[in-house]
Amino acid sequence: MSNNLEGGKSLLTRIKNNTDVSKHLIDLLYKKPDLSFNEAEFLFSVALLLIEEYQKIRNHDKYLLIEYAYLIIAVTCFKTNDFRALYDFSVNYGYYPTARTILESGLIKDEELTINHLISDLEIDKFVDENKVKTYEQNKVFEEILDSNFKQLSFIAPTSYGKSELVFQHIKKNNECNFIAIIVPTKALIDQTFRAAKRNISDRKIIVHDQNYDSEKDARVLAIVTQERGLRLIEEGIVFDLIYIDEAHELLDFNFSNLFSNRSLLLSRFIKLSMMRKPELKIIYLSPSIQNSKNLSLRDQGAIQSYRIEKNLKILKIRYLSRSCEEYIYDLFFNEFIPTGQIDLSSFDYITKVSISFRKNLHFLYRPRMIENYTEKLYSALPEESIPDEIEDLQRELATIIHPKFKLIKYLSKGIVYMHGRMPLLIRNYLLKFIRESDFLQNFVANAVVLAGMNLPIDNLIYISGFKSISDLNNLIGRVNRLNEIFKDGDSLSRLFIPVHFVDIEEYPQYSGTENSLKTKIEQLRGRHLEDVKNPLLEEYNKIKNAEKATEIRSLENQVIENYNNPDFFTRLTKAGAQQILNYTADGLQQLENILMNEEKIIGTENLIELILNKIKKVFFDSFLLSNIFLNSSLEVDTNLFNPGNNVKRLRYDATIDYYRRFLEFSFNGLNERIEDLYKYWTEDILGNNSRKDLNYYVYVGRQFGEVAYYETEAHQGQEVYVDLRTHKYDEDYLYNLAVIKIQTDEDFINHEITLLLSTLKEFEIITENQFNYFLYGTFDKKEIEVLRLGISRNIYQSLKANNQIENIGFDEFGNAYANEHLKSYIDKKTGIEKFELEQFFL
């Protein structure tokens, strides 16, 4: 049928072009609900031919053939209710979890069982680890990685194939390594990995922030940190022996508009510095989507040994609804959209009808504003239901800790939760607990936050908009029906089929904005894709576009690396962080150096937060602006000297400095108090005070929720990152929910951007370590700072302090926090989110 050089795609195209065969296949697989004996025999014969060709072909996309054979056999067995062929295939090709489940679920009748079934089932026992059955390929790759002597290697596997399990096994196997890092891209992944580490690691200190590290005491450390925090740990003197780079495909990304604030640049720097400090360093790259591990290599880094799980136990079941409400089934192997007919429903009625059929639906949109708009429409489309007690309790609790007008409270009454990065992290984690545990919560609307380690029991994906990258889309689809959900006791083997509904709605466009872009995106799921190596620090970067900038970036980054131990001014500024967000030109750097070298230190502690904020404004902004009396007294940025991002450049205004002074002073209050205070500030001090001429009606919320530009001078840039409060003057619900978004936006701004400027003042000894800590934690007390550095929320900390519980927090021999008996008793009496958070940190 083919020679050894023919690939899987080309062979499938030939079959598709033989319409007598392909039409019959499509009818039997997708249209006929039942199959005759002869029809099943035909399908099995096609599957056998594909298997034979799979054995011959050695090309990269040959796995399409075995995957198609697997689909044909599985569909046929489910339609005939005879699972012997699927069992035989699963045993022969190492799909052992499927084979074991078929026998344990009684899907092969007792009278049909043979001695071969029993013998093969005994053989599967060799692939059981802690009650989990591994595939042949999974078991083989795990063993190879655990026994590998390569210093640099990658583990590429579909989502839910035991990455975390492998990491902790590997750490135990390399127990002689004293300083280990797991580098993750987000705080949500830090939280999840930290919880898993607490269950698996007991012989070293687990830290989640650079400030948790004590260079004098900590001899054995597992650092679960972002690349930014990892770099600061290097600053503190850690020399890592072993590093895991989670979600390693993010190393490929780069935005030339941001230059020094690219997180892939910081990750590249972290890897390079770690290798420079420890030549025998071991690095493990982890990703569900990298096609070629060579693409991960930094310049002059050397080869990365690749370990990959190719075969996927899951089978995609894709449907597509067009904007004109025509529904199609998509055959990924033939790249064929098979019409099922015109749907006599609106898009949202269709979505409602689909979602009712599943236990947990993930609705995916990429923009937070779209998420909230979509959730409102989904809420209107869903029927009323009887609300269970635990959800009513949750509604009352959210009304207390956030605000009664928090819109999510209403959506919970119809089993909907929405989530995005502008929702407080603790609230997100608490809601995830309910999504996992409550059968009532059937619909989860979210964006890329779900890729940050949210392991949820999702059994249907409704994809509305998002993702330029097909790798990210595959990663998202991998979140549906995770393997531990498919093969857990008593669950249905039918969850091998992964339902994905792509729904094209005009008001929620894709990034490209073209009408057919969603359909095109579906087609890209077929087979492998070429990776776009955008990071100029990687060996495989070869772009002509931005070549000059790429050369400049490589030169400047080499300068930072070479001067790291004996830094010049540029390196000091880059290490501390200011250059990441302010982007000074050569002239600007010269001017800033003169300012920093001659600036007076801050003395004393009185009004310290106000003094530091004013110092930030004076040092980094005042001398770099152009005063323009013709533009509402706006202070324009002098782009010949620096080019700060939209968020941080607000610090050039006195009103902004005053706002953040006030924000930090109230930061230890409960979230509900802070929301109420912000609402009153907007409605009484700003919208309600017509006598003042210096009022600023514009609130910065970022691109996710921004509606207008601040001044006409910025409008031409298209940066609609503000909300004009006057537009929403009489919309109380909007303003209260905007307050939730604004508080989280400002928390992130302080943690991610102001802290970089703070670190720079500390680097140049304008503020002290103690002053730095006070700004961030509001106390000089070392024990209190140690507790706050764990990541505990400020209002929970205040509650512990008020109840004299700080003294009941202990630290073990490695420096890990734990609760003594008094604190355990205190936690046991708590309820709701307070108990949830305390248990995360101390039990």
Image (spheres, rainbow, N blue to C red):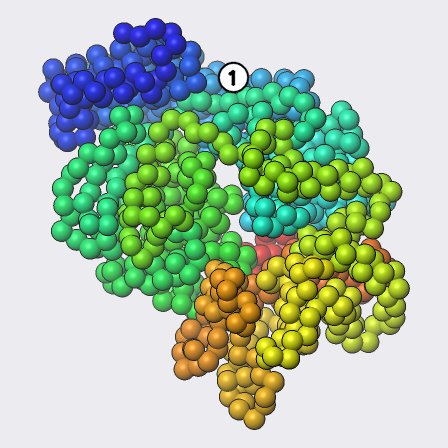
Q: Is 88 above or below relative to 451?
A: above
- Residue 101 placement (x, y as % from top left): 35, 25
For the N terminus, the quadrant is: top left
Between 79 and 534, the residue placed more toward the observer is 534
Residue at (81%, 37%) from the top-left corner?
562
Give the residue number, with chain letter if any, for mark 1: 140
Farthest residue toward the bottom? Answer: 691
Numbered circles on residues, count:
1
Give the image quarter of residue 786: bottom right
Identify residue type, mark 1: Lys
Between 593 and 118, the residue placed more toward the observer is 593
Question: Could you tell me if residue 668 is visible in this image?
Answer: no
- Residue 225 placement (x, y as % from top left): 66, 44
The reply, left or right, for residue 179 in relation to residue 363 is: right
Question: Could you tell me if residue 566 is visible in this image?
Answer: yes
Residue at (20%, 55%) from the top-left corner?
346
Task: Judge the density around disc 1: few (<14), some (14-19), many (≥20) Cα neighbours within 10 Å.
Answer: some
Give the image quarter of residue 599: bottom right
- Residue 349 placement (x, y as % from top left): 21, 55
- Residue 387 placement (x, y as % from top left): 31, 62
Q: Is 530 above or below relative to 41?
A: below
Q: Is 776 above or below relative to 110?
A: below
Between 408 and 2, the residue placed more toward the observer is 2
User: Which SS class for mark 1?
Assistant: helix
Give the image quarter of residue 659: bottom right
Q: Is 511 above or below relative to 384?
A: above
Between 722 and 419, the residue placed more toward the observer is 722
Residue at (45%, 68%) from the top-left corner?
707
Residue at (52%, 27%) from the top-left corner?
156
